[in-house]
Each structure stands twice: as structure tokens, then as C-alpha cells.
């Protein structure tokens, strides 16, 4: 048996040990963009996770990939780069098995990375143990350090927020319900001006109003609304990929202030699709030293 045949046999052995849902839950490409955006932000922020959280968020990543069956070679290259720096060989191998199971073609770099691990663990008789190992599902989020909507740039903490998805068309002033337009319209475009007013047909970049209840250094609360450009799913993915091209260790502590349109567009859509997003928030103790109020 030559080298290629041996590797193929190893891949087939891996496939036989895995079960992955073959029926993707993704119904249209907008959802695909959003799931890939979630994976991108995961790759950008995994370095920031405290060690005890790593397995939990990796488990969430695997669940998202299995349920959505979204694959993009560029996104997954960044994902493997993140795991090679801040994860471990077990995580790399588990992710690689999903690529093989779904017949997704990895890049040569990812292939070589995974094969080296497979050969080493096979030689040490640990391959079966890794493939069959289970992540700790009992270690729930309540044991993690508190994460918050905040930024070390201004040390402010948002203790409550809500979205108002009503937006006035800048051309005819018709009130648009962005959530309804997004869910029901067949005219959603993929570029920056992605919403079309159903009355005047004007294309526009919508803004969503975010209402904050804010705690500042004087320890009192105030309400502050802010209009944030709501990126289209495709623009959000492209923005995430642009950040990833500069490295896989984005500073979570300044995300909300540094890139507000990416941050709040992500939160908005992730909430809409019931996707977890706490991993993209900073730890409270990295923003402030005093304890959070009980009503957070």
C-alpha cells in the first residue's frame, strides 16, 4: 500500500467512526453567509477564551458546522490557523474529520497539518481514543467568568440593550420594518445598499437603532440610543474575512467601539437565528475591577 492509499484508508476509518447530519438546515445563501460569519468571529475571538471555556466554545463550533453544513475553504483555513495557535491537536483532528466526512476538500496546508497529527497519533495508538473522546458537556456557562457588552476604550458597561428595527426610508420617509423586509422580501441584495424600499424602490443601507442602558464610571445609569448601519449578511461576512486577513487574534476588549457596525450587525443577526454570541464579548474584569450590578 503506497502513501496515498494509506492516507485514504485512514480517512475512510475516520468516516466510519463519525455521524454527521446530512440534511443542512440552511435554506438560502443569506443564512449561509451568517453562519460563516459566526464561524469567522469564532476564529477571531477564540484566542481570548479562558482555558476552561475552550472546550465549551469548540463544542458550539462543531454543533454549528454540523447543523449548517456550511463550508468555505478560506473561512476554514482561518479556523484551522486559529486552532493551530490557540487550540490543540485533538480539536484540529476532530474538525478535520468533519471535512473528510462531508467530502469537503481542505487546502494543502490544512491537509498536511492534519495528516502529521494523524500519523503521530496512529503511531502512538491514540487515534481511536481521540476520535471517540467526548467533550465535557457538564461544564456549563454559569461557571465561566462574566462577559459583558463593554469596551476598555471608554470603560462603559451596557447593562441592557434592545433593537428597534423600524427605519425611515431616506428618500420617501416610509417607515420600514427591517426584520420583516429581511425575512419576507425577495429583493434583498448582497452588496452594501442591500434594502429596497417597497414604496419608492430606493436602495439603501439601513440603520438599526440600538437603545442602551449604560453604567459609567460615576456608577449611575443613563439611556442612550444610537443608529448603527446594519450590514447585509454578505457584507458582514466580507468584513469578517477582511479582519481575519490581518490575524486571528482580534482584540475583543475594543470590538464594540472599534467596529460597531460589524459588532451590532453580528449581534442582531445571531439573535435572530438563535446563535450564541457571548464568545465575542469581553470579560468584565478586563473592562472594570468592581462587580457588576445584580440587574445585569
Image (cartoon, rainbow, N blue to C red):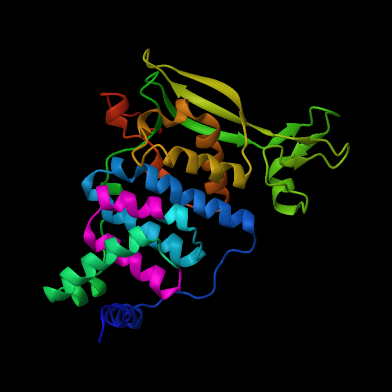
Rendering coords of residue 52 (x, y %): 22, 49
For residue 198, side relative to residue 63 (left or right): right
* Quadrant location, the C terminus: top left
Res 62 quadrant in image: bottom left
Rendering coords of residue 231 (x, y %): 61, 38
Rendering coords of residue 51 (x, y %): 22, 47
Taking the spot 63% from the left edge, 64% from the top edge, the residue there is 27
Asked if the magenta segment contains residue 83, the reply would be yes
Give the tally of numbered discs: 0
For residue 273, side relative to residue 286 (left or right): right
Q: Nearer the viewer, residue 295 or 98?
A: 98
The majority secondary structure of the magenta stretch comes to helix
For residue 184, side relative to residue 229 (left or right): right
Asked if the magenta segment contains residue 206, the reply would be no
Q: Nearer the viewer, residue 28 or 152?
A: 28
Taking the spot 64% from the left edge, 43% from the top edge, the residue there is 232
Res 119 quadrant in image: bottom left
Q: Which residues are magenta?
A: 77-104
Taking the spot 69% from the left edge, 34% from the top edge, the residue there is 206
Res 28 quadrant in image: bottom right
Considering only vertical position in the picture, is 190 above or below 123?
above
User: In this orientation, does residue 200 appear?
Assistant: yes
Q: Hey, which residue is sitting farthest right in the picture?
A: 200
Rendering coords of residue 215 (x, y %): 42, 21
Considering only vertical position in the picture, is 182 above or below 193?
below
User: In this orientation, does residue 276 appear?
Assistant: no
Q: Hey, which residue is sitting farthest front in the picture?
A: 2
Amino acid at each position: 500500500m503506497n502513501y496515498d492509499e494509506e492516507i485514504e484508508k485512514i480517512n475512510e476509518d475516520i468516516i466510519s467512526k463519525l455521524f454527521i447530519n446530512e440534511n443542512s438546515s440552511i435554506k438560502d445563501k443569506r443564512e449561509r453567509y451568517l453562519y460563516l460569519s459566526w464561524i469567522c468571529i469564532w476564529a477571531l475571538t477564540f484566542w481570548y477564551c479562558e482555558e476552561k471555556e475552550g472546550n465549551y466554545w469548540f463544542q458550539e463550533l462543531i454543533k454549528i458546522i454540523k447543523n449548517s453544513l456550511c463550508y468555505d475553504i478560506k473561512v476554514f483555513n482561518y479556523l484551522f490557523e486559529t486552532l493551530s495557535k490557540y487550540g490543540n491537536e485533538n480539536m484540529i483532528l476532530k474538525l478535520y474529520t468533519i471535512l473528510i466526512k462531508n467530502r469537503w476538500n481542505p487546502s494543502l496546508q490544512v491537509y498536511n497539518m492534519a495528516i502529521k497529527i494523524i500519523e503521530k497519533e496512529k503511531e502512538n495508538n491514540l487515534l481511536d481514543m481521540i476520535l471517540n473522546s467526548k467533550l465535557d458537556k457538564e461544564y456549563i456557562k454559569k461557571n465561566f467568568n462574566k462577559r459583558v457588552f463593554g469596551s476598555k476604550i471608554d470603560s462603559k458597561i451596557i447593562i441592557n440593550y434592545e433593537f428597534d428595527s423600524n427605519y425611515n426610508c431616506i428618500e420617501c420617509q416610509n417607515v420600514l420594518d427591517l426584520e420583516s423586509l429581511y425575512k419576507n422580501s425577495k429583493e434583498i441584495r448582497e452588496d452594501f445598499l442591500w434594502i429596497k424600499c417597497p414604496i419608492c424602490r430606493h436602495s439603501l443601507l439601513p440603520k438599526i437603532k440600538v437603545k442602551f442602558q449604560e453604567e459609567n464610571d460615576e456608577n449611575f445609569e443613563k439611556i442612550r440610543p444610537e443608529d448603527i448601519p446594519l450590514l447585509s449578511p454578505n457584507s458582514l461576512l466580507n468584513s469578517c474575512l477582511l479582519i481575519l486577513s490581518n490575524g486571528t487574534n482580534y482584540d475583543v476588549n475594543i470590538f464594540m467601539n472599534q467596529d460597531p457596525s460589524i459588532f451590532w450587525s453580528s449581534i442582531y443577526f445571531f439573535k435572530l437565528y438563535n446563535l450564541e454570541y457571548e464568545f465575542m464579548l469581553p470579560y468584565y474584569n478586563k473592562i472594570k475591577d468592581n462587580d457588576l450590578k445584580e440587574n445585569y
